[in-house]
Amino acid sequence: MRITGTGHASVFIETSAGSILCDPWVNPAYFASWFPFPDNSELDWERMGACDYLYISHLHRDHFDAEHLRRYVPKNTTVLFPDFPTTSMETELKDLGFTDIRRMPNEEVVDLDGINVMIQAMTAPTDGPLGDSSIWVEDNGIRLLNQNDARPAELTKFAELGEVHAHLLQFSGAIWYPMVYELPPAAKAAFGQQKRERQLDRSLRYIEDLNAKWVFPIAGPPCFLDEELFGVNDVFGDEGNIFPDQQVFVDFMAEQGHDNGIVLLPGTEATMTRDSIEVSQPIDDVPAFFERENKLAYLRDYQARQRETIELERKSWSHPEMDVFAVLQERVEPIMEQADQMSHGIGGPVLYQLTEPTPENPDPEIIEEVVFDFVERKVRRPLPEDKPRYRFRLQRRLIEHLLYVEEEDWVNHLFLSCRFSTKRIGQYNEFVYTFFKALTDERVNYVEGWYAEQQPDAEDIELDGWVVQRRCPHLKADLTRFGKIEDGVLQCMLHGWKFDLESGRCLTSAGHEIRATKEASSEA
């Protein structure tokens, strides 16, 4: 088996029975905020696009690059499709012209002309854009797991199938927190450092659970080439930056006693047998490439090459003829009416403050305010007595564009762009962000049903003097593996959520109480 790095989460897998192209992403995503790092545009996409199978893990635009798929992948290519409950990604694939979309049974091994393949679909509302997945491939006893962005509670399903030789997984940030939050610099840096450490630790736990022969950090980091966002790149010695690069993670692995990490650059080729691996890198000195000054110079050159692309993207966002307030009322209020679980979870108003920047005034005044009232289920203007749970400030033209293209998932376009700032009252509220990725009848009904079906976990475990429910109330992670207790607070290390065990209250988000009691012997 041979794998070729094709940038970010993308990889080209060659087996004895055919090739699989996974998650090809080349064009900028999220309002031209994200670019692949390093640049992968000069690869031989004609050759790799002529693959036997195409696999797209989920609908995030750094995995699903419609323009690239339209140009390079023949439309009769067999698409290996995760068993997602909503139709969004399948519809987009059909709109691009793909005709052979093979829905894979969830967590079942399928023989594809001599190679075994299994896809694990994740379907919680917080999994990607209502869905994420991993793919496992076996060719003549050589096994690969491409986990990419997926965060399953455990990797048991894959480990049971035999020793894994190549484990590809996300290690870097794919979120807007804490960069966009309006916080004092010291607080923002502290929260960023916690986030960075948590995501590195989470990836390390997956690595130790699967114990694969070789590990390839993928699915990050993106780079930010618009000058407004350039400071988000991890080249300024900021320990709170959540976008560490591939070499940082391989070095981190080595510090933790794992010397089997391999940097997968665009063009890296790794040929594996059951007992050996031969790696060919496209550059002579990989660690030197990632040194701060070299990386910064590379990003500046890359930025210069993409300046025209960014400017063209910017010009496409404005739709001044649109009455934003009226269109929001027309489209969003019917969704709010159906969102019983999410509206209850949000429990108050969410405020959008829209601005209109100019070259002379990059930090302009607010020109329009819109309130999403989740008590009355209305889109309205602000009232003096409002106490918004969340307040978002962003350019009006970004909302214009989302409405113009009838975007059903603002998280997948707006929030990941980092082109906004926000402030909240109280704890993080997952229902706010889940609602704004569910702006169609199908999506909101699926999410509402999923939340309604959640039942308290009946199984308890003993953990550091406490009896607690085994599964995390957030996304059902196994707390025997991911739970850590300190000073009466349990933290689920899979996603970082915290719970006060004495009261059962979730300290991270409203509405996720945990069942916990002190062991009798510990109280004596």
Image (cartoon, grey):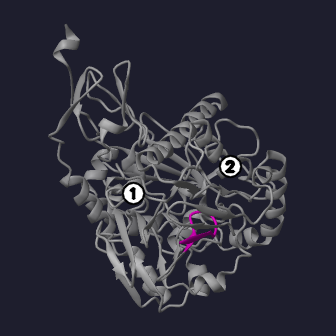
Is 6 inside the magenta-drawn segment?
yes
Is 151 inside the magenta-drawn segment?
no
Quarter of the picture holding the C terminus: top left
Instruction: Name the residue type under label 2.
Output: Gln
Residue 67 coordinates in the image, percent (x, y) = 60, 80
- Select label 1 or label 2 by which is in front: 2
Q: Along the line of sight, which residue is nearer the eye, 233 or 18?
A: 18
Residue 180 occupies quadrant: top right
- Residue at left 54%, top 51%? 175
- Label 2 neighbour load within 10 Å: few <14, some 14-19, many 20+: many
Residue 303 occupies quadrant: bottom right
Q: Secondary structure at mark 2?
A: helix
Lower position in the chain sequence, tag 1 or tag 2 = 1
Which stretch is magenta? 1-13
How far apart are the alpha carbons under marks 1 and 2? 27 Å
Position of 292 with respect to 69 (left or right) is right
* For residue 173, above or below residue 105: above
- Residue at left 42%, top 91%? 99
Residue 279 occupies quadrant: bottom right
- Disc 1 marks which residue? 127
Report the residue that reaches farthest toward the top.
Answer: 524
- Label 1 neighbour load within 10 Å: few <14, some 14-19, many 20+: some
The numbered disc on residue 465 is: none
Instruction: Name the residue type under label 1.
Output: Asp
The numbered disc on residue 247 is: 2
- Residue at left 46%, top 88%? 98
* For residue 259, above or below residue 102: above
Residue 221 coordinates in the image, percent (x, y) = 63, 54
